Image (spheres, rainbow, N blue to C red):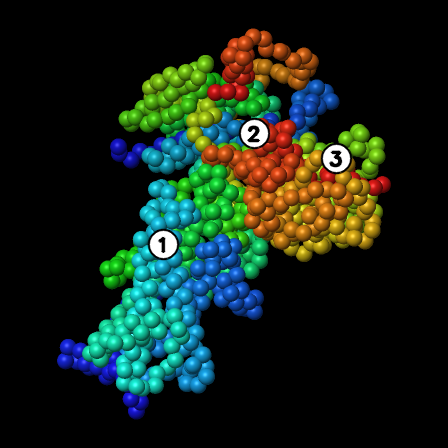
């Protein structure tokens, strides 16, 4: 196979790390109490970046990571640079304060158009998100889109063969033309560890910031069309469920329940 | 001119040439080849990472006298050890005689200065005894290696080839040396007797004595032939043996003296990432840790050369015992073989091949993560070969390449973000002291609340957060209060000690944790630190700098019992037989063996037995800190093996003094289905139950 140069954009997000937090609500009840939270890169996005790096390792090219958020979001850009991404873009503007999913996709559409990307990756979803950016972005760009992708193989020039995870753990193999948008499922690879030394090494790398002006965005187009009204933690159920039947039946039911809750794959 | 009964090699003729020509030629060729081999063997060491081993010379000399000369560790394996001690003593003794023999080939009647008088006579008797002893040992060793084949020497197929042939070959060479020297001596003595000349006294039963009588009636011509043939057999064997040494496991004959001189002097510590590079400068290095052969330090390479392949390390390694893909012995042997392969000695000036990646090459990732750093291998090695620093250096290399199992990435990230491997909230670190029933009786001071005290109880993560282990912290409180000690904890200001973070190779994260804790301890104003966790104890003692004195609670308990502050009631339970399990980081790494036993024995009526593997041969429970998160490939849990050992000793209660041992052994009892037969308790808990208020 001849040497290819892939330009890959990975859209990433800094999220409260659900595994390392005990979620409490704030006093108004419409958001988390963020004081005691620790943040990290959204898990799915981390797999997407790892996949992009592995593709570039195989065929050559560049990985660019992009995020939209407050100043602290640069932390996740640096983490992914330490991981092996080549470039980072930071999207920041007062107008980006309270975007809904469509708003974020609108900003990203401009970012994609400013570059020359063959492949755009997002995570399937964010810990605090709604799994909507990838699809919306692809639609706005009029690019092909595949979601819940758990393997990517480069076939001929500008053609990918991907597999998608469907309900019940089945696999569906598809062919897709580049440029395209893919949302990446966890488990597609084993993301490499990013050590403290790696992060310190990229601590002084300049990360360019893009604003509405840089992107030629009309702030009116960013106006949210959905508004969050409430956020709450459902009450835990009190009773325990006792499984009935023979040992075999109990085991079968239990495995089914564990599978349904994602405890078994 | 001394008259001799036979023509000496220095005066004989062979193939129309004076024999002294050959007597000189053999050593010159032998020494040239040997020198060439040594120079080639030194080539990788010249490319190795630096290592600082020229410090503390008196202690190093002491190690040489104890470990090398006195063969201190050999009798731990009694039979093999005694064989080796005799062989080694014989080697040292006969080195003088063998060298004298070589010189006799061209300088008739040569005697080393100082060996003319009584010393020479005594030496002559001694060397005859030693030669016989060495021959007996060589034959016994050959029978042992060739026929009985102790399991310790077996080489599993995946690790390479069996070395029994090499061992027997070398033992044969040694036997030939002894026999030829005896023949050389004996033939001369027989001839002297025939001619009525006075000869050096022979020790009855020695080889020279046997041959003197065996050939007592041989013709002078035969004796002359035997004399010269024996001489050149000895000469050729001697130099062949010398040149064979650097080609295999017998290189230790040459390198052991140096290896022991340069061996590690301190226990429980970890080498710096790179000698000569300060912590602040580590970020500037292109690569850290060991990724290729040349990243090892020269001492670590010397270790590889020095390994005698005796298998004592692997025999004691708990990872090897439970079928994890790690054997310290083969960690070394595989590296040695790689050195031999990539730095060949033949053909002359063969190209070297530096830079071969180790992980994915001779080592696998799982192999390197399988080590619990228990130190059993290093404790055992009679040659002072070290393993923990190499394992840590290899892990540093994998961390640097991002090559870390997913099971470890999560706790490492949590340690980075929250200072504990579970990612629990900082403010809940002191919650164990606020539990209702406990808090009704005891108030624990905390730096978090602005309290001060002279003694600081460093709790560390597992004892702070784990539901079961919190009971150790509460027991420690009871012990400290009963001992009349005013103490505090750091509360949310404490972070994980980072003990395993460092040993799993994430040096930078460890340094962040260390710096944070050091600052907090200094700020707290504590003058004395106590801990219930041997891992924290080892970290604070060995990995941190300039802290107030640190004590493990077992030491404090014994101190307070002895000065009368702590009084214990007699044993309350009947029919219990206790055994103490030495935690690796209390015992082997810090030599605290007595205090926990003294504390137990202070409880009147407590029946205590010892497991076969106790004290410095204790068997690791499965490892602490991050090892709890690692998912090893193994046939059996180490903890299960340990519980079985306790049962074998006749115990039904295992006492330990480490929260990780407690969690591993508690799990192991369940896994082994021995809930009704065995229980485990922490020393501090047991003492707390017997406090006389």
Q: Which numbered marker is on residue B82?
A: none
Q: Which numbered marker is on residue B671?
A: 2
Q: Chain of mark 2?
A: B
**In the depicted view, which residue is nearer to us: B77 or B493?**
B77
Q: Chain of mark 3?
A: B
**Residue count near mark 3 (Cα–Cα under 10 Å), binned few <14, some 14–19, many ≥20:** few
Q: Chain of mark 1?
A: B
Q: Which numbered marker is on residue B573?
A: 3
Q: Are marks 1 and 2 on the same chain?
A: yes
Left or right of B100 on screen, residue B18: left
Find numbered disc 3 in the image and state the secondary structure of the residue it sits on. Answer: loop
Picture coordinates of residue B343, whole percent (x, y): 32, 57
Picture coordinates of residue A191, whole percent (x, y): 46, 33
Whether residue B454 is situated above or below residue A245 in the rendered picture? below
**Residue count near mark 2 (Cα–Cα under 10 Å), binned few <14, some 14–19, many ≥20:** some
**First along the sequence among labels 2 and 3:** 3
Whether residue B251 is situated above or below residue B419 in the rendered picture? below
User: In front: mark 3 or mark 1?
Assistant: 1
Q: Residue at x 52, y 10 (%)?
A: A249
**In the depicted view, which residue is nearer to us: B46 or B586?**
B586
Whether residue B619 is situated above or below residue B220 in the rendered picture? above
Which residue in the structure is indicated by mark 1?
A: B143
User: In front: mark 1 or mark 2?
Assistant: 1
The outermost residue toward the bottom is: B1
Whether residue B97 is situated above or below residue B670 in the rendered picture? below
């Amino acid at each position: 196979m001849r040497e290819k140069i892939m330009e890959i954009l990975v859209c990433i997000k800094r999220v409260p790390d659900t595994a390392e937090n005990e979620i409490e609500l704030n006093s108004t009840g419409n958001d988390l109490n963020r004081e005691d939270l620790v943040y990290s890169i959204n898990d799915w996005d981390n797999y997407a970046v790892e996949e992009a790096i592995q593709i570039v390792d195989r065929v050559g090219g560049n990985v660019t990571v992009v995020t939209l958020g407050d100043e602290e979001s640069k932390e996740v850009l640096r983490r992914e640079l330490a991981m092996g991404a080549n470039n980072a873009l930071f999207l920041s503007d007062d107008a980006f304060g309270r975007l809904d999913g469509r708003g974020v996709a609108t900003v990203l559409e401009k970012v994609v158009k400013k570059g020359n990307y063959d492949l755009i990756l997002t995570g399937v979803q964010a810990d605090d998100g709604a799994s909507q950016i990838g699809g919306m972005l692809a639609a706005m760009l009029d690019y092909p889109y595949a979601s819940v992708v758990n393997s990517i193989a480069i076939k001929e020039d500008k053609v990918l063969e991907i597999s998608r995870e469907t309900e019940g753990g089945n696999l569906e193999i598809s062919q897709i033309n580049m440029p395209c948008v893919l949302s990446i499922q966890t488990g597609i690879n084993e993301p490499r560890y990013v050590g403290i030394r790696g992060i310190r090494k990229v601590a002084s790398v300049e990360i360019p910031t893009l604003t509405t002006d840089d992107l030629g965005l009309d702030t009116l187009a960013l106006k949210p069309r959905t508004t969050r009204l409430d956020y709450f933690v459902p009450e835990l159920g009190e009773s325990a469920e006792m499984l009935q039947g023979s040992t075999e039946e109990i085991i079968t039911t239990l495995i089914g329940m564990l599978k349904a809750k994602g405890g078994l794959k | 001119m001394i008259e001799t009964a036979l023509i000496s090699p220095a005066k004989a003729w062979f193939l129309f040439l004076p024999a002294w020509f050959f007597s000189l030629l053999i050593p010159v060729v032998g020494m040239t080849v040997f020198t060439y081999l040594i120079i080639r063997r030194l080539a990788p060491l010249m490319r190795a990472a630096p290592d600082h081993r020229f410090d503390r010379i008196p202690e190093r000399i002491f190690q040489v006298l104890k470990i090398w000369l006195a063969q201190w560790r050999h009798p731990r394996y009694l039979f093999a050890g005694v064989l080796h001690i005799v062989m080694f003593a014989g080697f040292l003794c006969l080195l003088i005689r063998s060298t004298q023999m070589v010189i006799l080939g061209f300088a008739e009647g040569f005697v080393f200065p100082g060996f003319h008088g009584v010393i020479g006579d005594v030496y002559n008797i001694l060397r005859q005894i030693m030669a016989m002893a060495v021959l007996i040992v060589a034959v016994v060793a050959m029978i042992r290696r060739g026929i009985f084949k102790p399991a310790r020497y077996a080489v599993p197929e995946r690790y390479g080839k069996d070395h029994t042939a090499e061992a027997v070959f070398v033992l044969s060479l040694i036997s030939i040396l002894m026999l030829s020297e005896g023949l050389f001596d004996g033939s001369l003595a027989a001839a002297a007797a025939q001619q009525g000349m006075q000869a050096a006294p022979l020790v009855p039963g020695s080889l020279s004595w046997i041959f003197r009588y065996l050939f007592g009636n041989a013709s002078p011509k035969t004796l002359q032939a035997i004399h010269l043939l024996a001489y050149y057999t000895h000469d050729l064997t001697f130099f062949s043996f010398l040149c064979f040494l650097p080609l295999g496991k017998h290189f230790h004959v040459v390198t052991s003296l140096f290896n022991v001189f340069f061996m590690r002097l301190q226990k429980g510590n970890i080498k710096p990432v790179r000698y000569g590079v300060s912590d602040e400068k580590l970020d500037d290095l292109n690569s850290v840790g060991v990724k290729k052969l040349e990243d090892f330090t020269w001492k670590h390479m010397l270790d590889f050369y020095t390994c005698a392949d005796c298998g004592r390390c692997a025999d004691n390694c708990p990872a090897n015992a439970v079928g994890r893909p790690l054997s310290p012995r083969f960690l070394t042997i595989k590296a040695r073989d790689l050195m031999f392969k990539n730095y060949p000695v033949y053909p002359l000036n063969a190209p070297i091949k530096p830079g071969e990646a180790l992980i994915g090459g001779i080592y696998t990732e799982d192999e390197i993560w399988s080590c619990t750093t228990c130190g059993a291998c290093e404790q055992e090695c009679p040659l002072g070969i070290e393993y923990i620093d190499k394992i840590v250096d290899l892990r540093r290399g994998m961390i640097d390449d991002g090559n870390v199992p997913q099971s470890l990435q999560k706790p490492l990230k949590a340690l980075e973000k929250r200072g504990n491997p579970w990612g629990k909230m900082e403010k809940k670190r002191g919650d164990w002291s606020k539990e209702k029933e406990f808090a009704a009786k005891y108030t624990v001071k905390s730096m978090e609340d602005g309290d001060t005290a002279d003694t600081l109880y460093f709790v560390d993560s597992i004892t702070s957060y784990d539901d079961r282990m919190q009971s150790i912290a509460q027991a420690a409180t009871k012990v400290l209060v009963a001992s009349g000690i005013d103490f505090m904890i750091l509360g949310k200001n404490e972070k994980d000690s980072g003990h395993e973070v460092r040993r799993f190779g994430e040096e930078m994260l460890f340094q962040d944790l260390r710096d944070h804790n050091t600052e907090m301890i200094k700020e707290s104003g504590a003058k004395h630190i106590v801990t219930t966790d041997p891992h924290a104890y080892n970290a604070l003692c060995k990995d941190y700098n300039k802290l107030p004195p640190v004590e493990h609670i077992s030491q404090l308990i014994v101190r307070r019992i002895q000065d009368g502050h702590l009084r214990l009631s007699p044993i309350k339970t009947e029919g219990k037989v206790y055994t103490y399990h030495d935690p690796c980081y209390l015992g082997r790494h810090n030599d605290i063996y007595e205090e926990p036993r003294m504390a137990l024995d202070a409880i009147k009526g407590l029946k205590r037995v010892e497991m076969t593997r106790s004290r410095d041969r204790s068997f690791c429970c499965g490892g602490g800190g991050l090892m709890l998160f690692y998912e090893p490939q193994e046939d059996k849990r180490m903890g299960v093996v340990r519980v079985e050992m306790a049962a074998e000793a006749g115990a039904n209660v295992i006492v330990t003094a480490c929260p990780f041992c407690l969690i591993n052994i508690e799990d192991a009892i369940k896994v082994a289905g021995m809930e009704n037969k065995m229980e485990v308790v922490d020393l501090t808990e047991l003492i707390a139950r017997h406090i006389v208020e």
